[in-house]
Image (cartoon, grey):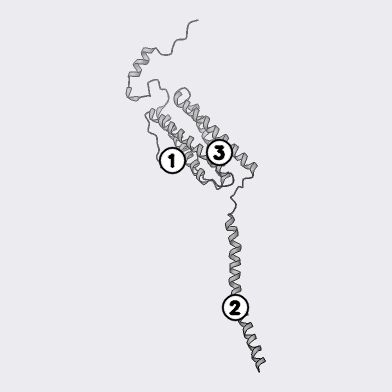
Amino acid sequence: MAAKPFLTDIQTIRRRAREHIERGAVTDGYQADRETVIKILNEALATEIVCVLRYKYHHYMAAGIHAQSVAAEFLQHAQEEQAHADRIAERITQLEGTPNFSPEGLLTRSHSDYVEGEDLVDMIKENLVAERIAIDSYREIVQYLGNDDPTTRRLMEDILGQEEEHAEDMSTLLEQLGKKGEPAKSAPARGAAKKAPAKKAAKKAVKKAPAQKAAKKASKKTASKVVKKATR
């Protein structure tokens, strides 16, 4: 059986490599719509930046009994999302595009939303929703690229795998906090609860003070009258 020939002979590959050398990594064999791929990657870049900002906010604002371990998880995810953003930006430049880091229109370009959440449980839920959005959109990107741009496809497949891990982490945290009875809303501060009765007691004391003074004056007058009568 004859060996399967290589798709393109080596002389042709060498010739094409020397043509349009200024294009860098983009050769004549690149089959995808480069402008569309750059646009898609800039949307993915915006998605990662928004995820970094959301995870960072949650890391610093996490509060509650179990906040320390959850905040550490938020920080780790923020760092990994930043690494995703850097890899995507690098790929955009390889395709002779410009990575869009502009804050203007960031949320419009991003696939996921920026929602802060009111408490620890809300924060985890919002991150889980964002990860699920990224999973679906990145899966579609992978399918769109197919064999037309295998390098970008592998990049997005790798990021997609990590986003699935992030979603699983958030789901596990949500389940664990439910079992531990993490309150949906943070409880009022103990100091605030103690201050209220103290203020009431102070007000009562202020009201009692004039009455006590009046009683003392009345008792003194009565005593002086009794003394006067006795001397007569």
Q: Earlier in the sequence, mark 3 or mark 2?
A: 3
At horizontal 45% and vertical 27% (from top left) the residue drawn is 152
Question: How many C-alpha atoms fall within 10 Å of the one at disc 1: few (<14), some, or many (≥20)?
Answer: some
In x, y percent, where is residue 149? 44, 24
Residue located at (53% from left, 36% from top):
131
Assign a secondary structure to mark 2: helix
Could you tell me which residue is drawn at 66 percent across and 88 percent down? 226
Q: Could you say which is closer to the camera, residue 215 or residue 182?
A: 215
Do the CB atoms of the residues marked 1 and 3 lie less than 8 Å apart? no
Residue sticking out furthest to the front: 231
Is residue 231 found left or right of 163 in the rendered image?
Answer: right
Residue 106 - label: 1
Label 3, residues with CA under 10 Å away: few <14, some 14-19, many ≥20: many
Q: Which residue is mark 3?
A: 128
Question: In the image, what residue type sits under mark 1?
Answer: Leu
Circle 2 packing at 10 Å, graded few (<14), some (14-19), many (20+), is: few
| Viewer-closest of 232 and 190 | 232
